Amino acid sequence: MEIRTHIKLSDLTRQVEDVIKGAFNSTYWIIAEIEGHKFYPNDDRHYFDFIEKSDVATEQIAKVSGVSWRDGSRTIKALKKKQASYLVMAYRC
């Protein structure tokens, strides 16, 4: 077996996607706080972090960075018009 010292980004992301699709074959609602939201109107993009904190303390136990554009950006704008204090997102694996 050959030991690889490098991998193309496209190969890596394809392998990660295959693993995720194999493990999760359904839609799941992700429960997390959103922190560090930044909006860039010229690009119509939102950048943020999904954060999960411990139930007993404010210790961060998980973090995933996210970006939203097109339909996602329109959804965020609509929620802001309604002055929604939360954002619900679904990720289909």
Image (cartoon, helix red, strand yellow):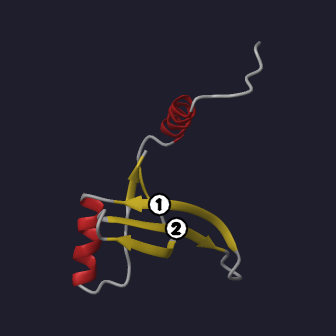
Indicate the amino acid at tag 2. Answer: Asp
- Judge by depth and name the residue closer to the eye, 64 or 54: 64
- Judge by depth and name the residue closer to the eye, 89 or 2: 2
Dot 1 or dot 2, earlier in sequence? 2
Indicate the amino acid at tag 1. Answer: Gly
Q: Quadrant of residue 80?
A: bottom left
**Residue occupying image coordinates x 51% and y 70%:** 32
State the image coordinates of residue 55 (x, y, percent, origin top left). Answer: 66, 78
Label 2: how many residues lie within 10 Å, few (<14), some (14-19) or many (20+)? some
Q: Is residue 9 above or below residue 51?
A: above
Q: Quadrant of residue 3?
A: top right
Q: Quadrant of residue 19?
A: top right
User: Which quadrant holds the N terminus?
Assistant: top right
**Residue occupying image coordinates x 38% and y 58%:** 90
Q: Secondary structure at mark 2?
A: strand
State the image coordinates of residue 15 (x, y, percent, origin top left). Answer: 55, 31
- Judge by depth and name the residue closer to the eye, 82 or 66: 66
Q: Which residue is mark 1?
A: 66
Q: Which residue is mark 2?
A: 49
Furthest residue in direction front, as rendered:
42
User: Which quadrant holds the C terminus?
Assistant: top left
